[in-house]
Amino acid sequence: MPYHQFECSKCIPERIKHAVDKTKNDLTEALPLGYLNTIPGTLSERGCAYCGAKHVIGTPMKDVIHLSHGPIGCTYDTWQTKRYISDNDNFQIKYTFASDMKEKHIVFGAEKVLKNNIIEAFKAFPKIKRMTIYQTCASALIGDDIKAIANEIMDEMPDVDIFVCNSPGFAGPSQSGGHHKINLAWVNDKVGQVEPKITSDYVINYVGEYNIQGDQEVMQDYFKRMGIQILSTFTGNGSYDDLRAMHRAQLNVLECARSAEYICDELRKRYGIPRMDIDGFGFKALTSSLRKIGLFFGIEDRAEAIIEEETKRWKPELDWYAARLQGKKICLWPGGSKLWHWAHIIHEEMGLEVVSVYTKFGHQGDMEKGISRCEAGALAIDDPNELESLEAMYKLKPDLIVTGKRPGEVAKKIRVPYLNAHAYHNGPYKGFEGWVRFARDIYNAVYSPIHKLSLTDISKDEITTDKSFVTRQMLSDDQLDESIINSEKLHEYTGEFDSVKKLRRKEYPQYPMKGKLAAV
Amino acid sequence: MPCKLKEKERTGVINPIFTCQPAGAQYASIGIQDCIGIVHGGQGCVMFVRLWFSQHYKESFELASSSLHEDAAVFGGIHRVEEAVDVLLMRYPHVKVVPIITTCSTEVIGDDIDGVINKLNEGLLKEKYANREVHLIPIHTPSFKGSHVTGYDVGMEAIISHFAKKDKPQKKLNILTGWQNPGDVRTLKHLLSEMEVDANIIFDIEKFDAPLMPDGNHTAHGSTTIEDLENTGSAIGTIALNRYESGRAAAYLEKTFGIPTIIGPSPIGIRNTDTFLQNVKTLTGKSIPQSLVRERGIAIDAITDVAHMFLADKRVAIYGNPDLVIGLTEFCLDMEMKPVLLLLGDDNTNYAADKRIKVLQENINYDMEIITNADLWNLGDLLQNKGLKLDLILGHSKGRFIAMDNKIPLVRVGFPVFDRAGYYRDPTIGYEGAMLLAEKIANVWFTDMEYTQNKEWLLNMW
């Protein structure tokens, strides 16, 4: 096995199997261990199973009171630390609820206080009739029966519905444990409870999509233009009651397979709904995704029309950036699925060299996909920790890393620019336009004139006095071919600061129903 | 009585003002040089607190986790502390101080961190790290007690009681800061240096504002050393800036070493800064120089420009850490403003007996409400449903949506401020802090006047 030995981790021998150098010929063997318990004290970047359930999957649901049963910190931490927006004025971002468990509750139990809490919360927001409750370490350890309390309330208040997710922080090696638990809890407890109104011959659930900076709304736009009814989105910009009707879809269109394949697999088992894995990132991947969906429903022409229109509109802008990003080295260090969503496509479409991939909470399957898609020579790291990340960056000297907010600050200090992989810089990044925005953000980071200034040591280096400013383009076009510089076809991004708002006002073509439900 | 102190009526929390104890202990621990704390609990208890600090500072701080997983929750996780200490010490050879910080889960399980520290001291540290100075410090911060404020207080006390020694040769004045920003430490150092006072500032977090340098890795870190911490036991006096954040450590030093001690008030505003300087004078015998008279004069001049013309009678709500809220309230009153609602985010029973609150109750002649165990929905509900009228809100960034949705301008102050750039660099204490705060409040108000067309022409000539 081409395991990678980090100098900083020689003293913890079990780490060696968590990093692999992808060699040219040895692809089948190049698989690090994954999803195992974290080694304590390593400064791993992993989160907990509570946040995986609540913050990643639960809270993007938009019309719900999200309540955590535990001490205040869990709630505080998972509030205003992500960018899952919605088209109903961001209730899920603005409000968070906690039972605020105190010492006396630990001793005597907190079921009564939880019940009070639930009643208070519904009273404070009388228009909201749906609630999710998340267990935490403390409420799990004292053994409160949250479901029993939820059932009591639902008996007493017939117009409300409550979902309970038992996924305490310690339930698994990382946030991934929580993804699994909430997937199963939702399909077990809530799917099948609501019968939806079917308005199209083509009905999907859009699964594993969290509407980061509007991703869901961008993809929803394409589906609507194809005349497809989106029964529910699991869970970004998703509606609680829509998600109770998931069983009536004809197809589950799955985006983030890491966090949401479980529910797709259950829906296939229980309701016979097929699962189709798609990819909203990148022109090529998105094109084949829309084609696949079109093919499934026999509406390829509608997919093709969108692909043609969007490609024509945005490809010259993508190519403007691609021409200027050729050969730039990137560490692709997201949480889970983006390592394989992005690994090949940023190489093919932007010319970036992926010199490293890592995953905080992915499983071996994610690594397998990621490694097979990235370049030979790339360093793949499972459950990276701070010293290993630093060592990798010093060795690989990337032009950019794509990672989380705090690790991004670590990179900044050693003069490596970063882009936020989870929350994005100026997203959305899905969709054709979104992919141009991603390329634009990468370009802006790589050629940031101020960032370049950090490399100069004014006490030692010769200070160039001939320039009073530098633009990105002065840096990026310095060695560029004249034909590219003077191309009339290629141009920089021309979209707006907010590319999502306008979608909310859009009207869509009405396709008359042909199927057996048409008469209903 | 126009000034009422009461507890929030609801049992639960909607939009918290405060977070939990371990976060506070972690904030204390990053103030020490060559120190990485280990939080004994689930990984989220560290990952999110590191994120929280990085949101405020746009910097990363080092903290480790014992990474409690399911088996540990069932069978006990103390062995994970042992492993964490060893792994941390092996990989970070410069680390000398390792606070072991508990959380709700490990307190409920009952993991004996004091016992394991004894075991490690007698075993691992003697055998494997015999030639290395290592301090393991237990900090008990169950999340279901107190808040990040008490967590900081408890953390500072644990750290100081571990290190403080008497009869050290250096005789300095202890300044125990509490939950401050780098700008505060900078201004403190300035005030003390003007008075020629040799001070031991715990924790010295000025370097939390770290540079991006052409070489090396200049990660943000506090610079309080073991020696500084040892010297606290031999100081000529102690001033704790914030009663609820550094009061315990100050009381410990007073009781154990007989060090003359003054707890509070937070030097927010002109008057409280005057008091602080007087206290420094009392404890050190040093006089207040002309340079500070002038600095004070500049601040008063600036505040006079905005106070009675613009700020007078403006109705304001203030939320955040208790010493900050009380200090800001006192300063606002000096500037002729009307703090009408104060929100303190925990159920600390000492607030009722706090002298500063009693004085407010004795002297306020309009309706003021102080809510303890409060959340931001206390504010949102009053604004949206109960007809509360406000001109301004002072508090941290977590209240941004309540402020925006109710169209009340929010002056960012406290922790965290993640939606404005560079605020950690501005002091809120000292004369400079007072001046900057007054100007910030005025400028926020001016912008609001302009964008709501509320007598925006007033500023045509000023």
Image (tube, coloured by chain):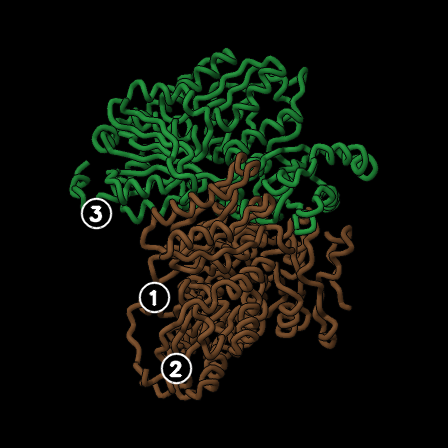
Helix, strand or loop for disc 2: helix
Left or right position of B349 against B447: right
Residue B119 in the image, given as x and y percentages of width and height: 77, 34
Tell me, for residue A114, which label it has, or none: none
State the residue position of label 1: A496
Residue A180's place in the image compared with B56, above or below, is below
The residue beneath circle 2 is A306
The green-coloured chain is labelled: B
Amino acid type, residue under disc 1 in the picture: Glu
Where disc 1 sits, the SS reads loop
Q: Residue at x 74, y 54 (%)?
A: A7
Give the colour chain A carries in the figure. Answer: brown
Q: Residue at x 44, y 19 (%)?
A: B276
Residue B402 versus residue B436: which sits nearer the camera? B402
Q: Calculate the distance from the C-alpha at mark 3 to the C-alpha at mark 2.
A: 43 Å
Chain to which mark 3 belongs: B
Label 3 amino acid?
Thr
Which residue in the protein does label 3 denote?
B452
